[in-house]
Image (spheres, rainbow, N blue to C red):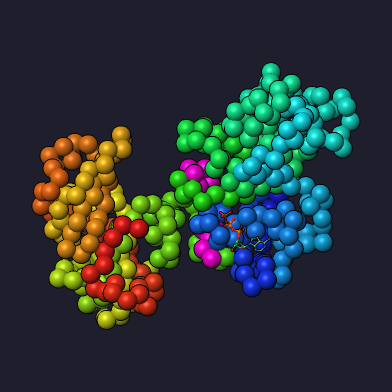
Amino acid sequence: MVQVKLAGVTKRFGETVAVKEISFTASPGEFLTLLGPSGCGKTTTLRLIAGFEQPDAGDILFDSRSVLSDPPERRRVGMVFQSYALFPHMSVKQNVVYGLRFRRGIEKRARVQELLEMVDLAGLEQRSPTELSAGQRQRVALARALAPQPRILLLDEPLSALDAKLRESLRTQVHRIQRELALSTIYVTHDQEEALAISDRIVIMNEGAIEQIGTPQEAYERPQTAFVASFIGRTNRLEGKVAAVEQGTVRVQAGDVTFVVSACRTPVTVGDRVALFIKEEHLQLDERGDNVLQARVISLEYHGEATVVHLESPLGSLRIRASYTEISVLSVGEQIKVSFPTDKAILFPDSFGKNRPGTWPNRIGAT
Ligand code: ATP
């Protein structure tokens, strides 16, 4: 088990700063996920760790030793890509054996068998990758990456080409194998649900920089930046202006409505523009919450385990996630009251809104 540490790492491609002074440590055996939107620098970070790219500044250390001068093959890193990268002219077995090309024959046979059993592909040794399903191909790629017993496993969006059901079952399998092998793993995804489900900790990236590092619960329940608050979960975003700062609460004026919220990450003063983030599941279809809004039901979207209610309020559109029983009394076009508790809105200074014309004061909407 290896500790992976990035210290102030920067990587530029010409004018583009793909990665900006990022620092994090993956503990030995940890499942760490890099999560963020397309182009935020996740793959570049992974390629820097693997040794396929060299940083312009900063250091990368495995167990406190800098690996910057080590070529990829000396870093003993296993990598799985979104596109499988299997050899189509080789069988399943030959693809996995390729990962063991520096081992002796007898050892190889036993190891290939062990790996194929681990990824539930025993019996398919002679198949060509073209005769496999997408999920099976990705499991071959995983077996090949694990074959030489890497010290660190790097996975770059390995499930994003698969359908939703397969993604879920394969992510469980990847997680199980990672746990069994106690392998330090860095996983890249833009899928927050996947990141929340399988990670020990998540590194949330935006525009080449780190916004927050924390457990899935911390990222979901205690976002430290406005970006994280809007990126994680399904969130309604409201804009307003600070009307008063009191003991433990902030009063926010948004159009004709005053909200009282308690969760404030950064100090604000009267007159500051702020953004409030309220998760879909924290808006209530009643007026029992501390902050109440009038709204009209626009549509009901049945999702099976929940129903999403689309609403139009004087401040803009809103979405609420509710149970089927809660919405059974609602009808499209109906005027209702919705509310949210003081402690369920997360408040940040509205740095996004400042230069956006026409957004103040009546912009409110699901992000
Ligand atoms: P995605 O989820 O779409 O794969 P990402 O978060 O992995 O995105 P990167 O692939 O790391 O992002 O790219 C970060 C930035 O660096 C992007 O602006 C990208 O265009 C740029 N970039 C990445 N590789 C290169 C390269 N080899 N040459 C030039 N620019 C690059």
- Is residue 181 in the magenta section? no
How many marks can you see? Answer: 0
What is the x, y in percent for residue 304?
Answer: 30, 34
Q: Nearer the viewer, residue 161 or 157?
A: 161
Q: Quadrant of residue 354?
A: bottom left
Could you tell whether 16 is left or right of 322 in the image?
A: right
Q: Residue at x 19, y 49 (%)?
A: 298
What is the x, y in percent for residue 140?
Answer: 68, 32
Q: Residue at x 69, y 21 (%)?
A: 124
Q: Residue at x 85, y 36 (%)?
A: 101
What is the x, y in percent for residue 6?
Answer: 66, 62
Which range is magenta?
194-207
202, above or below 54, in the image: above
- Which quadrant: the C terminus? bottom left
- Is residue 203 in the magenta section? yes
Could you tell whether 310 is left or right of 61 in the image?
A: left
Q: Nearer the viewer, residue 144 or 216?
A: 144
86, above or below 22, in the image: above
Could you tell whether 208 is left or right of 278 in the image?
A: right
